[in-house]
Image: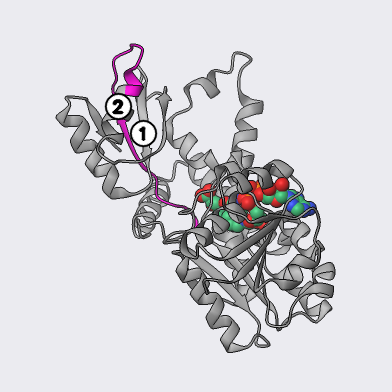
Amino acid sequence: MNSKRIGFIGLGLIGGSIARAIRRCFPSSEILAYDTDRDSLSLAMADGIIDYACTKIDEHYGTCDYIFLCTPVSYNSGYLSSLKEILRPGCILTDVGSVKTDIHLKIIELGLEANFIGGHPMAGSEKTGFSNSTAHLVENAYYVLTPSAKVPDEAVQRMREMVAAIGAIPIILGYQEHDYITASVSHLPHIIAASLVNLIKVSDSEDGLMKTIAAGGFKDITRIASSSPVMWQQICLTNGENISRILGDYIDYLGAIRQALDSGNQSELYDLFYTAREYRNSIPNASLGPIKKVFAVYCDIIDEAGGIATIATILASNNISIKNIGIIHNREFEEGVLRIEFYEEDPSLKAVELLRKYRYTVYER
Ligand SMILES: NC(=O)C1=CN([C@@H]2O[C@H](COP(=O)(O)OP(=O)(O)OC[C@H]3O[C@@H](n4cnc5c(N)ncnc54)[C@H](O)[C@@H]3O)[C@@H](O)[C@H]2O)C=CC1
Ligand SMILES: O=C(O)C(=O)Cc1ccc(O)cc1
C-alpha cells in the first residue's frame, strides 16, 4: 500500500488527523488535498503531511486510489457529482461524516455505490481545524464503515485494512442503523450540551456568577458545546428525523423526572442516579466509543513564576507527553489547581507517581 495516492477534500481536525496517520503508516504514499482554507493546506505542506495542495477538485483526484471527504456533511455530498466525472475505476471513495443516510442516498442517485464506502471515525473533539489535528486522534477508536452490497469484497477488505493501519477499529454497519445509533449517543448529547449552556447563559445574573463558579460536572458535560456550529447545524439538518425521535423520548423522560421532583418521589429519584451510575460504569474505559476517556490529574502548585514550566519540564524529561495543561478554578478546588491532561492512562499514572516523588500534592478524580 506504500505507493498509494490519497486525496483529501477538507483538511481540518478529522481530515488532517487521518492524513497525518496515513503519512506516519505509509511514508511513501502521495497525499493531495483541497480545502477552502488555504492556510490549512500551507500548514500541511510545511509539516510534510501533504505533497500537493490543490486549488480546486481537478484531474489529480482522478489518479487517486482513495479519496476522503472530510468537510461538514452537506458539503461532502455537494462534491459527489464533480467527483463522479473524474473518479478512477477501483478508487475507494469514502467520507468521515457523522451522518450516513443522506450521503448514501446521493451516492445511489449518482450510481456511485460500487466506489463508495461510507466512513465515520467515532473519535474527535470539540476542536476544529488542521492545527488541532494529530496522527493519533483515531487510534483505538471504532471506525464505522457502511459499504453497500454493491462494493466489491476486495475493496471493503482494503478499506478495513486502511482503517486498521491507522490504528482504528473497523466496524461494519448499515447506514440507517448507524444514523439511529449516532443520533442517540452523539447527536443528542451535543444538543443537550448546547442547550444547557444556552440555558445557563440566559439564567445567569449580570455579574456572571453561575459561569464563574460552574463546577467540574457542568464543564465535563458541556465540553462538546464548544464544537463547530456549521458542522452540527448540518448534522441536525441531515439526521433530523432520528434526532427528533430520540429527543422526544428524552423530553418525556425529563418530564417524568420533573414529576418525581415535584412529588418528592424518593425511590424514583434514587433510581435515576443509581441506574445511570451502574450503566455508565459499565461503559469500557479505553477510548472505545465516541466519548474518549479523559486522563487528567490535578496538582497544587506554588503561585510563582515558572511553576507550570517546572512541572512541564519534570514530565517532559521523563518522556511523558502532555495533551493539555492549565490552571482551573472551581468549587472543588477553591484555590485553583493545575490540571494536566494526558493522551493515555499509563503516562497519567506515571505522572502522578513522579509528581508525588517531587512532593507535589496530586489529586486523581
Ligand atoms: N469533530 C469531530 O469530532 C468529528 C467530526 N466528524 C466529521 O468530520 C467532518 C469534518 O469535521 P472536522 O474535521 O471536525 O471539522 P473541521 O472544521 O476541523 O474541518 C473541516 C475542514 O473542511 C474545510 N471546508 C469547509 N467547507 C469546505 C468546502 N466547501 N470545501 C472544501 N473544504 C471545506 C474547512 O476549511 C476545514 O478545514 C464532518 O463531516 C464531521 O461530521 C467525524 C467524527 C468526529
Ligand atoms: O468530542 C467528543 O467527545 C465527540 O463526541 C467528538 C465527535 C463528534 C462528532 C462525531 O461524529 C464523532 C465524535
Q: Decide which of 147, 243 is in the foreground and name it.
A: 147
Query: Is residue 329 inside the magenta stretch?
Result: no
Residue 307 image position (x, y, % from top left): 32, 18
Question: Which part of the image, by quadrant, shows the C terminus?
Answer: top left
Q: Is residue 151 above or below residue 40?
A: below
Q: Which residues are magenta?
A: 290-309
Tell me how far mark 2 sits from mark 1, CA to CA. Answer: 10 Å
Residue on which the image places disc 1: 340
Judge from the rendering whether residue 283 lies leftward or rightward of residue 254; answer left or right: left
Residue 216 image position (x, y, % from top left): 42, 33
Q: Secondary structure at mark 2?
A: helix
| Residue 328 visible from this viewpoint | yes
Q: Amino acid at mark 1?
A: Ile
- Tally of marks: 2
Q: Mark 1 Cα within 10 Å, few/some/many (few <14, many 20+)?
A: many
Judge from the rendering whether residue 108 lies leftward or rightward of residue 337; answer left or right: right
Q: Secondary structure at mark 1?
A: strand
In the image, which disc is placed on residue 311? 2
Residue 356 image position (x, y, % from top left): 18, 30
Q: Which residue is at the far top?
A: 304
Image quarter for residue 201? top right
- Tell me which label, 2 or 1, sits earlier in the chain: 2
Q: Is residue 304 above or below residue 358?
A: above
Q: Decide which of 263, 240 is in the foreground and name it.
A: 240
Q: Main secondary structure of the magenta part?
A: loop
Judge from the rendering whether residue 37 lies leftward or rightward of residue 144; answer left or right: right
Residue 192 image position (x, y, % from top left): 59, 46
Q: Marks 2 and 1: which is nearer the front?
A: 2
The answer to whether marks 2 and 1 mark residues whose Cβ atoms lie closer than 8 Å is: yes
Residue at figure coordinates x 56%, y 71% from the top left: 3
